[in-house]
Structures are given as structure tokens and as C-alpha cells.
Image (cartoon, rainbow, N blue to C red):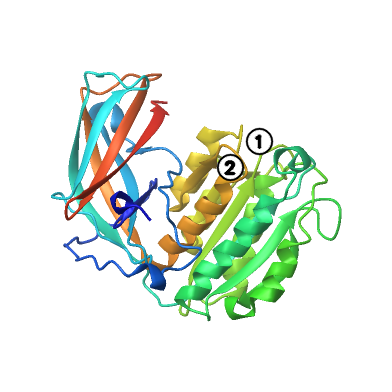
Amino acid sequence: MKAQVRGLLVAIICVAVLLPLGCSKKGVTIPTAASMDPDALYQTYIMGVPMLHSDFATSGQFDLAVIGLTFNENVYWATTDNASLNMMTSAGQASGYTATIMNVARRVPTLSQIAVQIVMDGSGSMAGSDPDYVRRAAGNLFVSKLKKRNPNNMVAVAEFSDSTGDYYFDQHRDFTAVSDSASIAAAFNVLGANGSTPLYTSIRRGIQHTDSAVSAASYNRSVIAFTDGWENDSYPSDTANGGFNVYTLAQTKGIPVFIVGLGAVDVPSMIRLAGYSGGVFAQASVPNDLKGIFAVVAVSLTQGYNVITCKVNPIPPSGTNLRYVFTMKSADNMYFRYVDFTIP
């Protein structure tokens, strides 16, 4: 492996509801090539978009959540000394906007074990958007990352599809320790493509099942929902805005919802649902992106991540297309990634 890629690898994800956390420096130890995990995250993955504060129009502040990883996938913590942010236009030119990192903090798991209810899209459109079933491989990689950290972590696999079982919430495998990865893999292997997209009802069912099946005193609980389309077939009472408010349920139960979208999904609604529940929205452009996204989410759930509060000046008006460059330094190496986004 070339010398310039040794050291820190950075993945960026975005969150909206963040707890105040402390921050301090942490050293980095780089293992030898012989000790590397063959499935380690050797690339930089970017998921989602910056989460604007509710008062962004007057404060210009937004949050990023950043996972810095060494080759053995231990977290490298950001500080105001080793991290920086730069704004430009989506064409890579000077934008006239300056970005300042206001605060760097940590969000870490409060318990040593996690339990994750995965809710997969099994609608008919999946036959075209993911014909090679990369989502199955992504799910198995997610499980392997959880198993690496703690074999007692648990995963459940459900699907919304009208091909078998419960159309809104077909639980292929209930909560199972990741040490039994073969049984969980069997659940991923039956994922299909038939039906519509009752996303909100399926997420609501996933939250309720997780709350009833898993103790909050023993596990950090969360739901991951994957979809390739727009919500179109939930119960009328299941919404992200009113009625049976899904993200309010998630907040009440303390179960954040992480949403992974593939292709042309309803980005504003997905950001709102994930963000207000305390989770993350991540978007994959092509199916192969799913493996990296699921792997990074797994690492963040088990180890934690950096919370970066930033401020842009002057405040961009709605519709402004921008690109930010986030950079982290480790010793003499520098790692960066471009992210394009539009101010809503």
C-alpha cells in the first residue's frame, strides 16, 4: 500500500440531534499490513448532508458527524487543531463564504452492547435499483463489523414487501447475537423485490418492536431503514410530520433512526426523520456505495464519532449550491474529502 494512504481514514456523516459532549486529543497507532482486517475501511466515505441548525437563517450554524479511523478501525478523535473546513462553489471555485469550526466534541455509546433492527426495502423497484442484491452483502458486512467489536451485539432483519409474510414488517430474523452471523445472513439472503414503499409504517413497526424486544438498560438500541424510493403506502396516521409522528416516537423511546437511501429518494423528508430522531441520513448514488455506508454506520454505532459544529459566513440563501472540504491531519499526513450540497 502506498505511503500516502497510510494512517488516518476519514468518513463523514451528518446528524441533527446531538448531545453536548467533551472532546480531547487521542493518539494514533498504525498497525502493520499483516495485522490489517481484509474488510477494513480503506476509503473515505461521505454520507448525507450537513444538518443545519433550526436557526441557521440567523446563526449560519450546522453540524457534521465525523468518523476518523486508523487502519485497525479505531477511532481517531478530531480536535480544533487537526480539523479544518473550507467552502467553495460546486465547481470548485472561491465561493465568498468562509467556514469556521466552532466546537469539536464526541458522541460515544453509553453501553458496551448494541441492538439494531434493520428494515429493508423489498418493493418492486429494488429489482432495477439493486439487481445484484448488493444490499445483502452490505448487511452482512455490517454484521461482521459489529461482531468484530462484540459478538454479543444483536441484529434483527425485517423487510417491507408483499411477497411473503407481513407486508409492512416481515421479520425474517428476530434479534440474534452477531456471533450467529450465519443465521442473520440467511435472513439477508431472502430479501426480494415485490410491492410498494410503506416506509413510515415499517419504521414505526421497527421502533415499536425494538422497544418491546430489547432492554434499554442492556443495549444501545437503534433502527436502520433502507429504501430506494419515496414513501407511498404507509397507514395515513404514520407520517414524519403529523398524525402518528414517527420521529416523535423514536425520540420518546430513545431509539434513533438511521436511514440509508439509494438513488432518487425524498431527501428532505429522510433528513428530517433521521435527524429529529437523533439518527443519520446517508445517501448512496449506486448500489456499491451501500457496503461502505453500512460499514461506517456499524463502526460509528460501536465506537462513536466526532461531532463538529460549524458556522458559515455570510449566511447563504436558500437554493445556494456549495461544496465543503473537510480535512483532518495525522502527523505529517493530511486527508480530505469534498461534499456538495444545496442550502434548503
Given residues 159 and 326, the one toward you in this image is 326
- Residue at image position (75%, 62%) is 189
Report, in whole angstroms, how far the alpha carbon at label 2 lies from the one at label 1: 10 Å
Q: Position of residue 109 (x, y in %)?
A: 37, 68
- Residue at image position (74%, 58%) is 169
Given residues 242 and 30, the one toward you in this image is 30
Q: In this rendering, does residue 18 appear at all?
A: no
Residue carrying label 1 = 230
Q: Please tell me whether mark 1 sits on a helix, a strand or a loop.
A: loop
Q: Quadrant of residue 124?
A: top right
Q: Position of residue 95 (x, y in %)?
A: 26, 19
Q: Please tell me whether mark 2 sits on a helix, a strand or a loop.
A: strand
- Residue at image position (33%, 45%) is 64
- Residue at image position (71%, 75%) is 183
- Which three-letter amino acid code belongs to the residue tagged 1? Trp
Q: Position of residue 24 (x, y in %)?
A: 16, 62
Q: Earlier in the sequence, mark 2 or mark 1?
A: 1
Residue carrying label 2 = 261
Classify the position of the N terminus by image quarter: bottom left
Residue furthest left in the image: 81
Given residues 181 and 321, the one toward you in this image is 181
Mark on residue 272? Answer: none
- Which three-letter amino acid code belongs to the residue tagged 2? Gly
Residue 288 lies, with reference to residue 180, above or below; the image says above
Residue 115 lies, with reference to residue 274, above or below; the image says below
Q: Position of residue 102 (x, y in %)?
A: 17, 43
Classify the position of the C terminus by image quarter: top left
- Callout count: 2
Residue furthest right in the image: 163
